[in-house]
Amino acid sequence: MVIELLKFKVAPDLRENFIQKDAEIWTTALAEYPGFLGKEVWLNPNDPSEVTFIIRWESFEHSDAIPQKELETLEVKFVHALGKFYPIVESAKYQVLKGLAD
């Protein structure tokens, strides 16, 4: 399994709308792709402007299979829905190893 981490800074009063529009636009679209296993939203209790998405994929191949044109189209739709662009402030992918602690 692969974990994709995406971190954003969002004004606390806009956070709920950001999360809702992300679910409507991004999560709905990602769920259509093979290998998508789910998505979580993590909120930092020490920084109310920090929103982290944890996206689970079956493999790196699955996480990288979405065409760039589709990603760009989704980003335009997301920015239009929010009325503002929110850059990713941190991005990483991790491979989950099974069997070591199981």
Image (cartoon, rainbow, N blue to C red):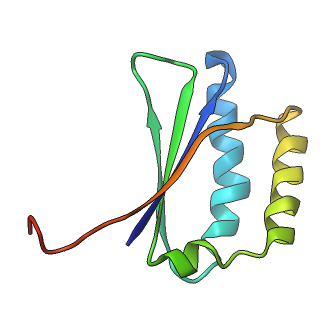
Of 96 and 79, the residue lying toward us = 96
- State the image quarter where residue 12 is shown: top right
Taking the spot 87% from the left edge, 70% from the top edge, the residue there is 69
Task: Residue 58 in the image: state x and y as whole percent.
Answer: 44, 77
Q: Note whether 56 is above or below 58 in the view shown.
A: above
Taking the spot 81% from the left edge, 59% from the top edge, the residue there is 74
Taking the spot 71% from the left edge, 75% from the top edge, the residue there is 66
Q: Note whether 28 is above or below 83 in the view shown.
A: below
Of 25 and 5, the residue lying toward us = 5
Of 46 and 13, the residue lying toward us = 46
- State the image quarter where residue 90 is shown: top right
For this view, does 79 lie left or right of residue 5? right
Task: Residue 64 in the image: state x and y as whole percent.
Answer: 63, 73
For this view, does 20 lie left or right of residue 6? right
Quadrant in the picture for the C terminus: bottom left
So how many labels did they put on this image? 0
Quadrant in the picture for the N terminus: bottom left
Task: Residue 3 in the image: state x and y as whole percent.
Answer: 43, 60
Taking the spot 70% from the left edge, 67% from the top edge, the residue there is 29
Q: Note whether 58 is above or below 5 in the view shown.
A: below
- State the image quarter where residue 34 is shown: bottom right
Task: Residue 56 in the image: state x and y as whole percent.
Answer: 45, 64
Q: Note whether 39 is above or below 67 in the view shown.
A: above
Of 97 and 30, the residue lying toward us = 97
